[in-house]
Amino acid sequence: MRARLALAVSGVVCELREVMLRSKPQGLLEASPKGTVPVLITRHGQVLDQSLDIMRWALEQHDPDHWLMPELGSLPDMQALIAECDGGFKRQLDRYKYPGRFASERVDETIEQNGCTAAQFQRTEGARFLAQLDAQLAKTSHLFGERAAWADMAVAPFVRQFAQTDQAWFDQQPWPDLQRWLTNWLASDLYSCTMDKYPPWVPGAAAVRFP
Ligand SMILES: N[C@@H](CCC(=O)N[C@@H](CS)C(=O)NCC(=O)O)C(=O)O
Protein backbone atom coordinates (compact mmCIF):
# COMPACT_ATOMS: atom_id res chain seq x y z
CA MET A 1 0.00 0.00 0.00
CA ARG A 2 2.83 2.39 0.89
CA ALA A 3 4.64 1.69 -2.37
CA ARG A 4 1.50 2.11 -4.41
CA LEU A 5 0.64 5.41 -2.70
CA ALA A 6 4.01 6.90 -3.55
CA LEU A 7 4.11 5.50 -7.07
CA ALA A 8 0.58 6.77 -7.69
CA VAL A 9 1.27 10.31 -6.51
CA SER A 10 4.62 10.49 -8.27
CA GLY A 11 3.14 9.22 -11.52
CA VAL A 12 6.25 7.09 -12.05
CA VAL A 13 4.92 4.25 -14.14
CA CYS A 14 5.98 0.71 -13.37
CA GLU A 15 5.05 -2.78 -14.45
CA LEU A 16 3.04 -4.21 -11.58
CA ARG A 17 3.30 -7.88 -10.70
CA GLU A 18 0.78 -8.94 -8.09
CA VAL A 19 2.21 -11.60 -5.78
CA MET A 20 0.32 -14.19 -3.76
CA LEU A 21 2.40 -14.65 -0.64
CA ARG A 22 1.58 -18.34 -0.40
CA SER A 23 3.01 -18.87 -3.90
CA LYS A 24 5.95 -16.52 -4.39
CA PRO A 25 7.32 -16.35 -7.94
CA GLN A 26 10.93 -17.50 -8.34
CA GLY A 27 11.83 -14.13 -9.85
CA LEU A 28 10.76 -12.37 -6.65
CA LEU A 29 12.97 -14.62 -4.51
CA GLU A 30 15.90 -14.22 -6.91
CA ALA A 31 15.58 -10.44 -6.76
CA SER A 32 15.07 -10.38 -2.99
CA PRO A 33 15.65 -13.65 -1.10
CA LYS A 34 13.86 -12.35 2.01
CA GLY A 35 10.66 -12.85 0.05
CA THR A 36 8.61 -9.93 1.30
CA VAL A 37 6.59 -7.51 -0.77
CA PRO A 38 6.85 -4.89 -2.05
CA VAL A 39 9.93 -5.19 -4.21
CA LEU A 40 10.78 -2.68 -6.90
CA ILE A 41 13.45 -3.26 -9.56
CA THR A 42 14.52 -0.06 -11.27
CA ARG A 43 15.33 0.03 -14.95
CA HIS A 44 19.00 0.09 -13.95
CA GLY A 45 18.54 -3.18 -12.06
CA GLN A 46 18.66 -1.74 -8.55
CA VAL A 47 16.51 -3.80 -6.18
CA LEU A 48 14.52 -1.95 -3.51
CA ASP A 49 12.84 -4.31 -1.07
CA GLN A 50 11.72 -1.97 1.70
CA SER A 51 8.48 -0.07 1.24
CA LEU A 52 10.01 3.12 2.62
CA ASP A 53 12.90 2.93 0.15
CA ILE A 54 10.42 2.50 -2.69
CA MET A 55 8.41 5.50 -1.49
CA ARG A 56 11.52 7.61 -1.22
CA TRP A 57 12.81 6.48 -4.63
CA ALA A 58 9.49 7.24 -6.36
CA LEU A 59 9.25 10.67 -4.73
CA GLU A 60 12.83 11.49 -5.61
CA GLN A 61 11.92 10.85 -9.27
CA HIS A 62 8.87 13.08 -9.12
CA ASP A 63 7.20 14.69 -6.14
CA PRO A 64 4.41 16.88 -7.54
CA ASP A 65 2.59 17.19 -4.19
CA HIS A 66 5.81 17.92 -2.26
CA TRP A 67 5.50 14.95 0.07
CA LEU A 68 9.21 15.16 0.85
CA MET A 69 8.94 18.86 1.70
CA PRO A 70 6.34 19.13 4.44
CA GLU A 71 4.71 22.40 5.27
CA LEU A 72 5.82 22.07 8.90
CA GLY A 73 8.91 20.32 10.20
CA SER A 74 11.54 18.68 8.07
CA LEU A 75 12.36 15.45 6.31
CA PRO A 76 14.29 14.16 9.38
CA ASP A 77 11.25 14.97 11.56
CA MET A 78 9.09 12.85 9.29
CA GLN A 79 11.69 10.08 9.29
CA ALA A 80 11.74 10.08 13.10
CA LEU A 81 7.95 9.66 13.28
CA ILE A 82 8.00 6.93 10.63
CA ALA A 83 10.75 5.15 12.60
CA GLU A 84 8.53 5.19 15.70
CA CYS A 85 5.73 3.74 13.63
CA ASP A 86 7.88 1.02 12.08
CA GLY A 87 9.54 0.20 15.39
CA GLY A 88 7.45 -0.05 18.51
CA PHE A 89 4.05 0.64 17.00
CA LYS A 90 4.32 -1.98 14.24
CA ARG A 91 5.47 -4.52 16.80
CA GLN A 92 2.45 -3.74 18.99
CA LEU A 93 0.10 -3.79 16.00
CA ASP A 94 1.28 -7.26 14.93
CA ARG A 95 0.83 -8.65 18.44
CA TYR A 96 -2.57 -7.03 18.83
CA LYS A 97 -3.81 -8.11 15.39
CA TYR A 98 -2.34 -11.62 15.30
CA PRO A 99 -2.07 -12.75 18.94
CA GLY A 100 -1.93 -16.41 17.86
CA ARG A 101 1.30 -15.88 15.95
CA PHE A 102 3.04 -14.60 19.06
CA ALA A 103 1.42 -16.95 21.59
CA SER A 104 4.78 -18.56 22.41
CA GLU A 105 6.25 -15.23 23.56
CA ARG A 106 6.68 -14.91 27.29
CA VAL A 107 3.72 -13.12 28.87
CA ASP A 108 4.90 -10.62 31.42
CA GLU A 109 3.67 -11.18 34.97
CA THR A 110 2.39 -7.61 35.15
CA ILE A 111 0.02 -8.31 32.25
CA GLU A 112 -1.31 -11.36 34.00
CA GLN A 113 -1.74 -9.47 37.25
CA ASN A 114 -3.68 -6.72 35.49
CA GLY A 115 -6.04 -9.33 34.15
CA CYS A 116 -5.76 -8.31 30.50
CA THR A 117 -4.81 -10.52 27.60
CA ALA A 118 -1.48 -10.07 25.82
CA ALA A 119 -3.38 -8.62 22.83
CA GLN A 120 -5.16 -6.05 25.02
CA PHE A 121 -1.85 -5.11 26.57
CA GLN A 122 -0.36 -4.52 23.11
CA ARG A 123 -3.40 -2.46 22.16
CA THR A 124 -2.85 -0.25 25.19
CA GLU A 125 0.80 0.16 24.30
CA GLY A 126 -0.02 0.99 20.66
CA ALA A 127 -2.65 3.47 21.81
CA ARG A 128 0.09 5.73 23.15
CA PHE A 129 1.48 6.27 19.65
CA LEU A 130 -2.05 6.87 18.33
CA ALA A 131 -2.77 9.43 21.06
CA GLN A 132 0.45 11.19 20.06
CA LEU A 133 -0.71 11.28 16.43
CA ASP A 134 -4.09 12.62 17.54
CA ALA A 135 -2.40 15.43 19.45
CA GLN A 136 -0.32 16.30 16.38
CA LEU A 137 -3.46 16.22 14.19
CA ALA A 138 -5.32 18.53 16.58
CA LYS A 139 -2.94 21.29 15.47
CA THR A 140 -3.00 20.74 11.72
CA SER A 141 -5.15 18.64 9.41
CA HIS A 142 -2.19 16.44 8.47
CA LEU A 143 0.79 15.26 10.48
CA PHE A 144 3.19 17.90 9.17
CA GLY A 145 0.95 20.74 8.14
CA GLU A 146 -2.27 21.38 6.28
CA ARG A 147 -1.41 19.14 3.38
CA ALA A 148 -0.50 15.45 3.24
CA ALA A 149 3.15 14.51 3.20
CA TRP A 150 5.30 11.38 3.19
CA ALA A 151 4.77 10.66 6.91
CA ASP A 152 0.97 10.65 6.56
CA MET A 153 1.16 8.11 3.79
CA ALA A 154 3.77 5.94 5.48
CA VAL A 155 1.90 5.80 8.78
CA ALA A 156 -1.75 5.67 7.62
CA PRO A 157 -1.73 2.04 6.38
CA PHE A 158 -0.72 0.83 9.85
CA VAL A 159 -3.22 3.06 11.64
CA ARG A 160 -5.88 1.59 9.34
CA GLN A 161 -4.85 -1.94 10.29
CA PHE A 162 -4.90 -1.05 13.98
CA ALA A 163 -8.34 0.57 13.67
CA GLN A 164 -9.81 -2.34 11.74
CA THR A 165 -8.63 -4.93 14.25
CA ASP A 166 -11.52 -3.81 16.49
CA GLN A 167 -13.31 -0.97 14.74
CA ALA A 168 -15.91 -0.52 17.51
CA TRP A 169 -13.15 -0.07 20.09
CA PHE A 170 -11.20 2.34 17.86
CA ASP A 171 -14.32 4.44 17.19
CA GLN A 172 -14.87 4.85 20.93
CA GLN A 173 -11.41 6.26 21.63
CA PRO A 174 -11.03 10.00 22.37
CA TRP A 175 -9.06 10.66 19.20
CA PRO A 176 -11.36 12.84 17.05
CA ASP A 177 -8.56 14.27 14.96
CA LEU A 178 -6.95 10.93 14.26
CA GLN A 179 -10.37 9.46 13.38
CA ARG A 180 -11.09 12.37 11.03
CA TRP A 181 -7.64 12.05 9.38
CA LEU A 182 -8.08 8.29 8.86
CA THR A 183 -11.65 8.65 7.56
CA ASN A 184 -10.58 11.31 5.06
CA TRP A 185 -7.69 9.21 3.86
CA LEU A 186 -9.90 6.13 3.44
CA ALA A 187 -12.26 8.24 1.31
CA SER A 188 -9.49 9.57 -0.93
CA ASP A 189 -8.92 8.62 -4.57
CA LEU A 190 -5.32 7.86 -3.74
CA TYR A 191 -6.34 5.28 -1.17
CA SER A 192 -8.85 3.69 -3.58
CA CYS A 193 -6.26 3.33 -6.29
CA THR A 194 -4.00 1.36 -3.95
CA MET A 195 -6.86 -1.03 -3.22
CA ASP A 196 -7.47 -2.03 -6.84
CA LYS A 197 -7.21 -5.77 -7.22
CA TYR A 198 -4.99 -7.44 -9.82
CA PRO A 199 -4.74 -11.08 -10.82
CA PRO A 200 -1.60 -12.80 -9.49
CA TRP A 201 1.28 -12.50 -11.93
CA VAL A 202 2.30 -15.64 -13.80
CA PRO A 203 5.27 -15.99 -16.20
CA GLY A 204 4.29 -14.77 -19.63
CA ALA A 205 1.33 -12.69 -18.39
CA ALA A 206 0.65 -9.42 -20.18
CA ALA A 207 2.31 -6.46 -18.47
CA VAL A 208 0.11 -4.52 -16.06
CA ARG A 209 0.83 -0.80 -15.84
CA PHE A 210 0.71 1.08 -12.54
CA PRO A 211 -0.46 3.75 -11.88
N1 LIG B 1 9.89 -3.84 6.19
C1 LIG B 1 9.28 -4.40 5.02
C2 LIG B 1 8.20 -5.36 5.45
C3 LIG B 1 7.57 -6.03 4.27
C4 LIG B 1 6.62 -7.13 4.70
O1 LIG B 1 6.76 -7.73 5.78
N2 LIG B 1 5.67 -7.43 3.84
C5 LIG B 1 4.75 -8.51 4.10
C6 LIG B 1 3.44 -8.24 3.44
S1 LIG B 1 2.74 -6.70 3.91
C7 LIG B 1 5.31 -9.77 3.49
O2 LIG B 1 5.73 -9.75 2.35
N3 LIG B 1 5.38 -10.87 4.24
C8 LIG B 1 5.97 -12.07 3.73
C9 LIG B 1 5.10 -13.28 3.89
O3 LIG B 1 4.02 -13.16 4.50
O4 LIG B 1 5.48 -14.35 3.39
C10 LIG B 1 8.72 -3.29 4.14
O5 LIG B 1 8.26 -2.28 4.68
O6 LIG B 1 8.74 -3.41 2.91
Image (cartoon, grey):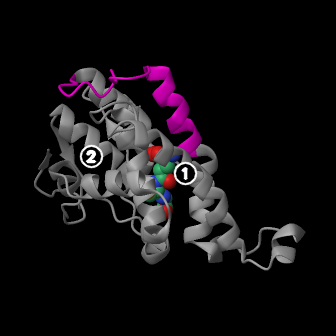
Q: Is residue 157 visible?
A: no
Q: Which image quadrant is residue 167 in?
A: bottom left
Q: Position of residue 33 (x, y in %)?
A: 50, 47
**Residue at label 2?**
4
Cα distance between the residues tagged 2 and 1: 27 Å
Above or below, comparing residue 111 to residue 62 in the picture: below
Three-letter code for the amino acid on which mark 2 is drawn: Arg
Q: Find numbered disc 2 in the image and state the secondary structure of the residue it sits on.
A: helix
**Residue at label 1?**
131
Q: Residues within 10 Å of mark 2 (few under 14, many from 20)?
A: many
Above or below, comparing residue 148 to residue 91 in the picture: above
Q: Which residues are magenta?
A: 62-86
Question: Residue at (66%, 72%) from the top-left corner?
Answer: 120
Is residue 176 toward the left or the right of residue 211 in the image?
right
Q: Position of residue 57 (x, y in %)?
A: 33, 27
Q: Residues within 10 Å of mark 1 (few under 14, many from 20)?
A: some
| Labelled disc at residue 166 | none
Q: Nearer the viewer, mark 2 or mark 1?
A: 1
Is residue 12 toward the left or the right of residue 44 in the image?
left
Number of marks: 2
Q: Is residue 19 visible?
A: yes
Magenta-drawn stretch contains 82 = yes
